[in-house]
């Protein structure tokens, strides 16, 4: 039982040290504060239940991030019909905020990406993770992650360009 206690402490330390980052990761999927907090709680609960399955204590962070990503995706599948317009998005419409529309277009474009692309974009650019760490979280090899990142960026560029083209035609 002693080993289990040590792993539980490692998990709690990981959660405590990375709580903002973990919350942001969940939030980037659901765009809702309460849902993101629920996901984090749920992920912590799941992690404690399966802590004994963790072989390599050195990879506890990527192991836990994977649980957060999976829990977020499960949540989205269950609540597919729910689309909440959050305060942050509403705030971006308030006059006097520069490039709010670009940020909004980018957020929408990221949401439109297939899950496997969205995950690598979020982890790379919002969580500032290295390719190797993303590979651990997604359980893919480094080349797959690089390819997905490239394809996701290509899709984002195309959808953002289309948005800007639409704006030009509407003026």
Image (cartoon, rainbow, N blue to C red):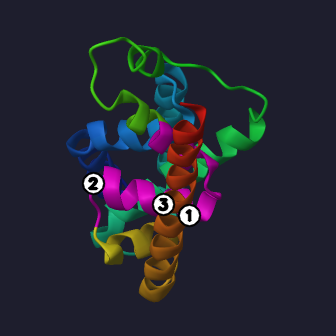
Q: Name the residue under label 1.
A: 155
Disc 2 crowd, CA 10 A, few/some/many (<14, 14-19, 20+): some
Q: Main secondary structure of the magenta part?
A: helix
Q: Do the residues labelled 1 and 3 touch (CB within 8 Å)?
A: yes
Alpha-carbon distance for marks 3 and 2? Answer: 40 Å
Q: Where is residue 149 in the image (x, y as percent from the top left)?
A: 46, 71
Name the residue tied to disc 2.
10
Crowd rating for badge 1 (residues with CA inside 10 Å; few <14, some 14–19, many 20+): some
Residue located 28% across and 20% down the image? 97
Label 1 sits on a secondary structure element that is helix
The residue under the point 37% across, 11% down is: 94
Q: Residue 163 carries which label?
A: none
Name the residue nearer the viewer: 62 or 115: 115
Q: In this picture, is 115 found above or below 21?
A: below
Residue that lies at the very extreme toward the left in this rendered image: 17
Report the residue marked by disc 3: 157
């Amino acid at each position: 039982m002693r080993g289990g206690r040590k792993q539980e402490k490692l998990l709690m330390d990981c959660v405590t040290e990375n709580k903002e980052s973990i919350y942001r990761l969940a939030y980037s999927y659901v765009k809702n504060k309460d849902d993101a907090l629920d996901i984090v709680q749920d992920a912590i609960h799941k992690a404690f239940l399966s802590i004994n399955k963790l072989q390599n204590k050195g990879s506890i962070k990527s192991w836990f991030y994977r649980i957060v990503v999976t829990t977020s995706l499960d949540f989205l599948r269950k609540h597919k019909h729910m689309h909440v317009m959050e305060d942050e998005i509403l705030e971006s419409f308030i006059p006097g905020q520069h490039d709010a529309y670009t940020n909004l277009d980018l957020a929408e474009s990221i949401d439109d990406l297939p899950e496997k692309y969205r995950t690598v974009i979020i982890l790379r650019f919002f969580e500032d993770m290295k390719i190797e760490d993303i590979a651990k979280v997604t359980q893919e090899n480094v080349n797959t992650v690089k390819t997905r990142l490239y394809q996701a960026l290509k899709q984002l560029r195309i959808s953002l360009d289309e948005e800007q083209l639409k704006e030009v035609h509407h003026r």
